Image (cartoon, grey):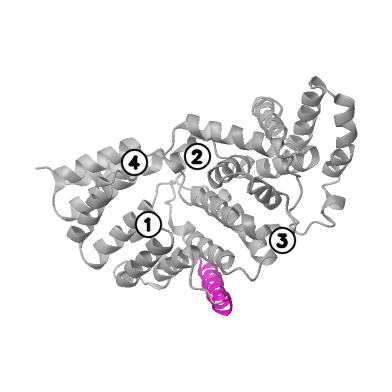
Amino acid sequence: MWRIEGARITAGLARAYGDFGLAEDAAQEALAQALVQWPVDGEPRNPAAWLTAVAKRRAVDTLRRGSGLDERYASLAGGLTSLHDDGADARAHDLVGDDVLRLVFIACHPVLGREAQVALTLRVVGGLTSEEIARLFLLPVATVQQRIVRAKKTLAAARVPFESPEPAEWPARLGAVLAVLYLVFTEGYSATSGERWMRPELANEALRLGRVLAGLVPREPEVHALVALMELQAARFPARSAADGSPVLLADQDRRRWDRAQLGRGRASLARADETARRRGRGRGPYALQAAIAECHAVAADVADTDWERIVLLYEALGAVAPSPVVELNKAVAVSMAVGPASALRLVDELAATGALAGSYLVPSVRGELLAQLGRAEEARSELVTAAGLVGNERARSVLLGKAAALPSA
């Protein structure tokens, strides 16, 4: 509940008070009070309203302790009323029309660098902890914390208005907005930490925001492509975990449980992205290419039926327009299915030699899989155990250790 409502509460407070830090602190304090009070008194009938009321009181208390109280109250009077009234008047002329998406646009202000935009939005909108964000980007926690603090100070120093940007300003922020939405979705698709394999509520909120965004900028092909990608991946949710919550990997999933209606919506969004790009004289961008890869899985009857050669080509195209070590690693996995594990292992070893993804479980987990397919059980076991020691998610760790244990002994 907090993953979604926390963002909405923070967004409403930020709009009312015009202060990112104050809004986030007040919302967090409300959550802390709920964790103490609810187990004793019981959960309120409307938890979101309870949290909002407490957060507003905390914000006012903070302001009372500050300087220039009278002036601040005068400037905030309208904001308080707006928050109390659910912002109806304020949104009357607001084209974005969604508190959370508005907050994403504000956090993606050009005054911030891309790294700061993403870190701040993942924290405030996605509700991710500094530790979770650090795992996503393979950064020290202290670096992420400093990045978020600096981002808040920069927005305050620049006196960034807490209102929807004009449509003319959207293109400059769109790339960061898309990146953030997909990162939030990714965290919901495969959690970086904790005991849950997935966080569907987080992924579905990112998808909801993507749909709203597609309605706002219907002529942007990559927005439709991102929606397509999220739809196609979210369609697998019913088959991605067992009844006990343990992960079910792609090869073992019962594809009859995939959400066919959602797959249809994803394919339709990808077709719309392609058509929009064609009209604008563009080729497929990074999200369209990833959606096309997801579509290859969507239309295949099983892993053996999948067009792996096409997926390899799509990854090569993706590597050309948006190069990254993760793309290269995923391409290696596709190569292993299309050509064989030996060719894929060479690609992974070349990638590992560059030092890319050092400290991540991704490289040893893929190496372990490939070595196992090549019959090099002891090396495979060592890699899988190493990967298990690096992964932050308990469910993913169990899968890796299970694979290591299942390998034949020498």
Which residue corresponds to the image point at 65% horizontal and 61% vertical from the top-left? 213
Q: Label 2: state its secondary structure.
A: helix
Q: Is residue 61 magenta?
A: no
Tell which of 260 and 70 is nearer to you.
70
Residue extent of the magenta highlight: 259-280
Q: Which badge, 1 or 2, comes first in the chain's sequence? A: 2
Coordinates of residue 389 in the picture (x, y in percent): 32, 35
Label 4 Cα neighbours within 10 Å, binned few <14 / some 14-19 / many ≥20: some
Which residue corresponds to the image point at 79% horizontal and 24% vertical from the top-left? 61
Q: Which badge, 3 or 4, comes first in the chain's sequence? A: 3
Q: Is residue 396 left or right of residue 47?
A: left
Which residue corresponds to the image point at 54% horizontal and 31% vertical from the top-left? 146
Q: Quadrant of residue 304?
A: bottom left
Q: Is residue 211 visible?
A: yes
Q: Is 87 rendered above or below residue 35? A: below
For the residues labelled 1 and 3, the Cα–Cα distance comes to 32 Å
Q: Which badge, 2 or 4, comes first in the chain's sequence? A: 2
Amino acid type at circle 4 is Ser
Q: Give the residue at mark 2.
A: 133
CB-based contact (under 8 Å), mark 2 and mark 4:
no
Q: Give the residue at mark 3.
A: 168
Q: Quadrant of residue 364?
A: top left
